[in-house]
Image: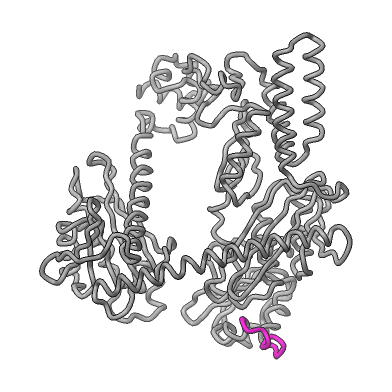
């Protein structure tokens, strides 16, 4: 990477090669990340007179104090690296899609003898095949429910090769699971079923329908009328699923069609998935323009969408239709073509059937933006009322810009954890949430756990102004002092929290508690907990309840995860030379630790090798 103090000198010394550039401010914080075919030429363009006409560039260019670059072999590598940097560093002036953990993939575990079908939030398993991403989880589950009636499959939590099972699962009796472990279907037959399901998810249903019709006719000729009836039901279910998909021109075979709508600081994209001349899926996306990216042009929005969406997308089309030409379209086309070994073009048609399809996508995008704006306006009004009502009830001069709420969760005195959730300007701020594993408390003691959590959190607050360059190692959320602290609890919990704040010299931070039983609010007045009147249905009270419930959810989720990890431990963890992979092999092969214990040495060595097998048997 190149690091120089003088901007003009930095630009002059940049390489004329493809790569990624990072603009940083005086504190070293990344302002903007971009890709370029020639780094020197692209970066120089930001400091030209023509660039001054762009309001976004006019705002962030004066803040640039440092330019870093990463040289790549080609533009495609730069595209991937840019997407990774944007996701990792979240630069304020880059266009970003909303957090992709909200999107859903359909996952097929093709690396197993009997593949399972489930949903996932990340593309992480290289041995599996993923379809998506989809933005509507409910629609995905509904589609899988229908597809399982047509192509029965096993669930991930019902392992087909688990030798400890003694009888078929309930889903087998409902006709949803073929139970291959009982010889009801061969491995080849099961895989053929899964292949047909994946073709249906790809939108290639013609051959699947024809296969079902042929099997139905064959069964009928053999007088296997029960099987023929079952195949008929599967065929009708598939045709019903197809009937819900909007038909377009069959000549527009396999395409992704992207519509864009942009108004002020709000922007959305709608992607229509067209397979075999049918719109088989609609995916809605919104952009995060909450910071410096609010002045982005539609070309920048579209360029950002293409790079971020197609980095993770599966089930790629033959062509991507976009509403306008963007500089990065050729790079995306080359990247997609290299991924799947066939030509995939990115084009912006001006007329004809493809243009009509684009207009349909844009109409859907405009409708989606109006719907979101209506919801955002309603939420903003509710948040504003809640903050104003809360400030009035607590006697605060102004609504609290940052509220932190704390909760403690424990499972019978074990896996005790704490949560901190943050609300900024009346809206949840998940990026600032933090969780705590309570280390000094044994058994059930919510007061002690709360004291430990608050002590660890507020010891990190910088009460004195510190140069930004000296705070790089500090937690962004812990380094900020809240305008209001909310404790999930009544008088006792508020008193315990007040003691910690006083010890740390933070007694001036407003502190309240919200009791669960009657939703009573207690305020610390410097000496004791005082109940305050706040109607349960008042906007301020509802805001506090929302915050408290979120803290409770966050703590419970982390507590369960911690407890689950503790329960997953076994005596095999203590065997030298046996890691998670070998432990998994042993449990899968023998069914349980007891099964490993009862197996003879050669059988165990056959699974994990001679040395590890001997260590396992000696330990057990």
Task: Please provide percent x and percent y for residue 13.
Answer: 66, 81
* Closer-to-camera residue (407/277): 277
Task: Please provide percent x and percent y for residue 443.
Answer: 19, 43
- Residue located at (79% from left, 13% from top): 220
Is 507 positioned to the left or the right of 584 in the image?
left
Magenta-drawn segment: 48-56
Q: Report whether residue 460 is seen.
A: yes
Quadrant of the rendering where the C terminus is positioned: top left
Q: Is residue 563 magenta?
A: no
Task: Please provide percent x and percent y for residue 187.
Answer: 66, 21
Q: Is residue 552 above or below residue 291?
A: above
Is 601 positioned to the left or the right of 514 in the image?
right
Q: Report whether residue 1 is seen.
A: no
Quadrant of the rendering where the N terminus is positioned: bottom right
State how many labels appear: 0
* Closer-to-camera residue (202/395): 395
Question: Furthest-top residue in view?
Answer: 223
Is 47 positioned to the left or the right of 381 in the image?
right
- Residue located at (39% from left, 68% from top): 426
Task: Please provide percent x and percent y for residue 184.
Answer: 63, 15
């Amino acid at each position: 990477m190149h690091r120089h103090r003088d901007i003009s000198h930095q630009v002059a010394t940049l390489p004329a090669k493809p790569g990624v550039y990072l603009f940083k401010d005086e504190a070293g914080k990344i302002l903007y990340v971009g890709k370029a075919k020639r780094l020197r030429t692209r970066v120089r363009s930001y400091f030209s007179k023509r660039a001054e006409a762009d309001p976004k560039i006019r705002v962030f260019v004066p803040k640039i104090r440092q330019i870093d670059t990463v040289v790549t072999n080609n533009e495609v590598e730069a595209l991937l690296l840019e997407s990774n940097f944007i996701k990792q560093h979240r630069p304020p002036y880059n266009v970003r899609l909303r957090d992709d953990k909200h999107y859903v993939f359909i996952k097929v575990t093709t690396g197993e003898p009997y593949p399972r079908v489930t949903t996932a939030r990340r593309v992480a398993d290289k041995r599996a095949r993923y379809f998506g991403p989809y933005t509507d989880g409910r629609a995905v589950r509904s589609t899988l429910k229908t597809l399982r009636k047509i192509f029965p499959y096993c669930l991930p939590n019902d392992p087909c090769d688990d030798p400890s099972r003694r009888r078929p699962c309930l889903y087998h009796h409902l006709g949803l699971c073929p139970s291959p472990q009982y010889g009801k279907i061969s491995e080849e037959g099961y895989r053929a079923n899964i292949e047909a399901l994946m073709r249906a998810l790809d939108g290639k249903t013609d051959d699947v329908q024809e296969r079902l019709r042929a099997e139905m006719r064959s069964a009928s000729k053999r007088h296997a009328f029960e099987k023929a009836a079952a195949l008929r039901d599967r065929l009708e279910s598939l045709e019903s699923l197809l009937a819900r998909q909007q038909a377009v021109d069959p000549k527009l075979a396999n395409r992704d069609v992207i519509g864009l709508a942009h108004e002020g600081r709000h922007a959305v994209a709608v992607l229509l998935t067209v397979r075999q001349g049918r719109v088989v899926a609609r995916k809605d996306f919104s952009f995060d323009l909450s910071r410096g990216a609010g002045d982005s042009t539609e070309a920048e929005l579209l360029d950002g969408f293409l790079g971020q969406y197609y980095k993770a997308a599966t089930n790629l089309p033959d062509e991507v239709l976009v509403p306008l030409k963007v500089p990065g379209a050729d790079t995306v086309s080359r990247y997609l073509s290299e991924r799947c070994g066939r030509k995939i073009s990115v084009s912006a048609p001006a007329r004809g059937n493809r243009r009509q399809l684009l207009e349909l996508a844009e109409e859907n995008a405009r409708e989606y933006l109006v719907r979101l704006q209506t919801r955002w306006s309603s939420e903003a009004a509710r948040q504003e009322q809640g903050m104003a009502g809360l400030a009035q009830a607590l006697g605060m001069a102004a609504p609290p810009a940052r509220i932190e709420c704390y909760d403690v969760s424990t499972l019978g005195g074990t896996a005790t954890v704490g949560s901190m959730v943050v609300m900024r300007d009346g809206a949840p701020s998940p990026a600032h949430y933090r969780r705590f594993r309570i280390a000094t408390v044994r058994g059930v003691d919510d007061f002690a756990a709360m004291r430990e959590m608050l002590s660890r959190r507020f010891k990190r607050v910088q009460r004195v102004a510190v140069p930004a360059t000296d705070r790089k190692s500090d937690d962004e959320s812990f380094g900020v002092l809240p305008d209001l602290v909310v404790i999930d609890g009544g008088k006792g919990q508020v008193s315990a929290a007040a003691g910690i704040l006083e010890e740390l010299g933070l007694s001036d931070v407003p502190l309240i508690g919200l009791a669960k039983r009657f939703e009573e609010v207690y305020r610390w007045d410097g000496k004791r907990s005082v109940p305050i009147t706040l109607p349960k249905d008042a906007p301020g009270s509802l805001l506090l309840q929302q915050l408290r419930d979120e803290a409770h959810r966050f703590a419970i989720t982390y507590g369960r995860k911690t407890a689950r990890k503790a329960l997953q431990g076994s005596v095999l963890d203590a065997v030298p030379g046996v890691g998670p992979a070998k432990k998994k092999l042993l449990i899968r092969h023998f069914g349980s630790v007891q099964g490993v214990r009862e197996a003879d040495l050669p059988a165990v060595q056959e699974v994990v090798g001679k040395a590890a097998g001997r260590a396992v048997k000696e330990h057990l």
